[in-house]
Image: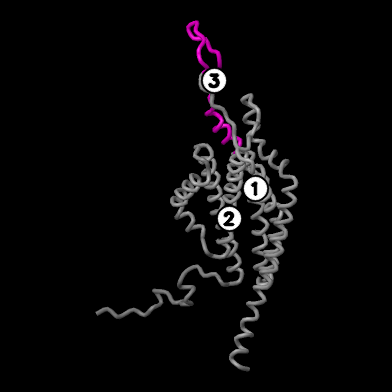
Amino acid sequence: MSREDDIEDSSAPLIEHLTELRTRLIYSVIYFFVGMVICFMVAQPIFNFLTAPLCSALADRGQDCDLIFISPQEGFFVAIKVSLLGGFMLAFPFIANQMWRFVAPGLYRSEKGAFLPFLVASPFMFILGAGFAFFVVTPLAYEFFLGFQQFGRSGEVIDGVQGAAPLSVVFQGSAQEYLNLTVKFIVAFGLCFQLPVLLTLMGKAGLVGATGLRAVRKYAVVGILVLAALVTPPDVITQVILFIVVYGLYEISIQLVARVERKREAQLRADGLWFDDEDDMTGDDTHPEDEPKEPRL
């Protein structure tokens, strides 16, 4: 067999993997496109659902829930953004299935059993974080923002003189700006809720340990504070909530990684592969008292 034949044989598996990857990506794009089309057809009800926190905050103040389009094409782009977000969430289970079918043939049975729970937990935690953002954080944020409105009373009489109407500054929001802010909340909290999944998976792979995570806790606090300042609007309420939630998830991640390490240690002990100290690892059974002593002069 010639050298060229060797090269072709060695590259054949790579070509097969790339072909399989292309097939899975094509299917994923199709699923996403179908989900996007479905959500585009019902974009208005989805958008009306997303405006619930704002409408509730305005109703508490006796105001109408009216959003405006500041450009002719804004309504179309709002529908597209709603379709993108909804299409991805609708198609994610199918996309995850395509990812699993691409990765699974290269894993051992034990690795499949270890990886599959994380594939299931990831979308669950994202939905949990998105729900927490939408039902808890977003209403508090809009209550805070709308508190800066200023209502003037026209025709106010001062010292018997009809005065001019004081300045009135009320909310008349853009539909696109509102959607951008709400989606930012949902995506930010959904991604932050992936922290336990990511750290636990890294702990199972041996990339991080519970001791190391505890040692860098003070740096994690600073990083979470920076993250909260970057991914949330400039108000103290949402930043504090995000910090508390993410730091709590970090502490939960430490406990999960410690649990993974205990299970790994128990398995290694059962297999007789766990060594408590370096002497056991070297196999040296001698002790200092057993070594021959030099005679005293």
| Residue 35 x/y as whole percent | 72, 53
Q: Residue at x 67, y 73 (%)?
A: 19
Front residue of 107 and 2: 2
Give the mark, 3 or 1, whose residue is nearer the N terminus: 1
* Residue 152 - label: 3
Q: Quadrant of the C terminus?
A: bottom left
Q: CA distance from mark 2 to mark 3?
A: 55 Å
Q: Which residue is mark 1?
A: 81
Residue 116 is drawn in which quadrant? bottom right
> Any magenta on residue 162?
yes
Q: Which residue is mark 2?
A: 256
| Residue 161 x/y as whole percent | 49, 7
Q: Which residues are magenta?
A: 138-165
| Residue 294 x/y as whole percent | 31, 80
Q: Quadrant of the N terminus?
A: bottom right
> Any magenta on residue 131?
no
Give the amino acid at mark 1. Lys
Give the amino acid at mark 3. Gly
Taking the view exactly as shown, the residue that stands out farthest to the front is 72
Taking the view exactly as shown, the residue that stands out farthest to the bottom is 1
Question: Dot 2: few (<14), some (14–19), or many (≥20) neighbours within 10 Å?
Answer: many
Q: CA distance from mark 3 to mark 1?
A: 36 Å
Front residue of 285 and 192: 192
Q: Residue at x 58, y 72 (%)?
A: 272
Front residue of 290 and 145: 145
Looking at the image, is 63 positioned above or below residue 242?
above
| Residue 55 x/y as whole percent | 65, 32
